[in-house]
Image: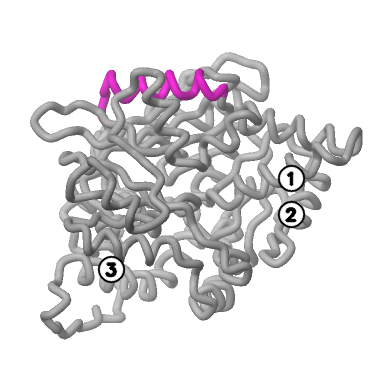
Amino acid sequence: MATTSSWVPTARLAMALANAGCIVEAVCPAGHPVRMTKALRKIHTYRGLAPLMSFKKAIVAADPDLIVPGDDLATRHLQDLHRRGQTEGNAGTEICHLIEHSLGAPESFRVVFARNAFMRAADQESIRVPKTAVVGNVEDLKQLAFGFPLVLKADGTSGGNGVRIAPTLEQAEHALRTLQAPPLLARAAKRALVDHDTTLLWPSLLRRRFVVNAQAFVEGREATSTIFCWKGSVLAALHFEVLEKMHAAGHAAVLHLIDHWEMSMAVEKMVRRLNLSGLYGFDFILEAHTDAAYLIEINPRTTQVGHLALGPERDLPAALYAAIAGDVVPASQKITEAETIALFPQEWIRNPGSQFLRSAYHDVPWGEPALVGDCIRRSQTQRAWYAKQNLAAVRPSSSPMTVRPEPAAVEVDCEAK
């Protein structure tokens, strides 16, 4: 596993892969929660100021059958290693082959990170998509025929950090300037020093501006698909409707398992067209009143639900193990019969009093108490941040409000186990 950020779902996937029979090693930041688990045979340290060297050293030392990227930047690093390997002659052939084996056809590398190119490819496959166009300036915004509200998205961002919904042209202009701007150096330094996350360092230091896409707004409910695919075929898939999110444009916290033929068909078509391999996520909007599925983007890496084993053709780690072992996918047991799942620690951080912590399956990794403890220790800072995000999303800018911090005391409901 290769990851550049300290994201808890990466630790959960490592545990699930080990349970499926894989021998797992990871290259990850020093403070990654996966270090709190018993899933790994060996840990290699990711260094944000020398990212490709970190990855290459880990790959050479581990000699893996497959590389699983845990975040978008990790996928970019692997793509960069592939490009570098192509210039190294025979010396780079082996690592190029491994990366293609892990991610799929190199022709698809650019497409999965370019929202406009991806949406064009989906449209050519007769998949339902909202109108999308690259916007570089205010004049581009004025010439769009989409109408308002408008969704603006920056390439190379994830977790909702690069998404804005603009109800008016004036707000769209402000959002465009914000999304295009390189990350502030102070923000990048804080994240690197405090959170051990160097994702923003190079974009900030190089003053790299982001490509921004405008997308027609589709009124409806959010949905998501997480899949494991192999050489252009989907071997296992999970389709969910999103019930609760960490904040307005953030990660899901509560999901409901669904069967949706249009989502399944769209995923299969895009996996086949791009000849993908590995773990991927696809985001959709289920249109209000019609339930039609609009494909809005692809995530070229694992998502936070990739570890869930929910029965035949719904167990991604089991499908991955079978693919690299050259075996049939074994019949796997479901971790729960419940169709609504509250993710830990996401929903607990979002709302410690949430009804879903009792009514849904609360996905706590009870078998790894050190990981549970680590999540609890991290929760106070995260709760404060998400509280600010939620407040900013709902309050009028002209209406000052006082924010009272949540109590520091933490109560863990062990009966929910």
Circle 3 packing at 10 Å, graded few (<14), some (14-19), many (20+), is: some
**In the displayed structure image, the side of residue 132 where residue 198 appears, left or right:** right
Question: Which of the pair 158/367 is nearer the observer?
Answer: 158
Residue 100 percent across, percent down from the top left: 69, 30
Dot 1 corresponds to which residue?
81
Residue drawn at (49%, 48%), measured in percent from left and top? 12
- The span shown in magenta is 258-275
Question: Which of the pair 55/82 is nearer the observer?
Answer: 82
Q: Earlier in the sequence, mark 1 or mark 3?
A: 1
Q: What kind of residue is marked 2?
A: Leu
Circle 1 packing at 10 Å, graded few (<14), some (14-19), many (20+), is: many
Dot 2 corresponds to which residue?
52
Separation of disc 1 and disc 2 at Cα? 7 Å
Label total for image: 3
Residue farthest to the left, as pictured = 289
Residue 223 higher or lower than 383, as above or below: above
Q: Is residue 417 visible?
A: no
Residue drawn at (28%, 47%), measured in percent from left and top? 143
**In the displayed structure image, the side of residue 150 where residue 132 appears, left or right:** right
Which numbered tag is attached to residue 389? Answer: 3
Residue 22 higher or lower than 394, as above or below: above
Q: What kind of residue is marked 1?
A: Leu
Residue drawn at (62%, 65%), measured in percent from left and top? 202
Mark 1 touches mark 2? (CB < 8 Å): yes
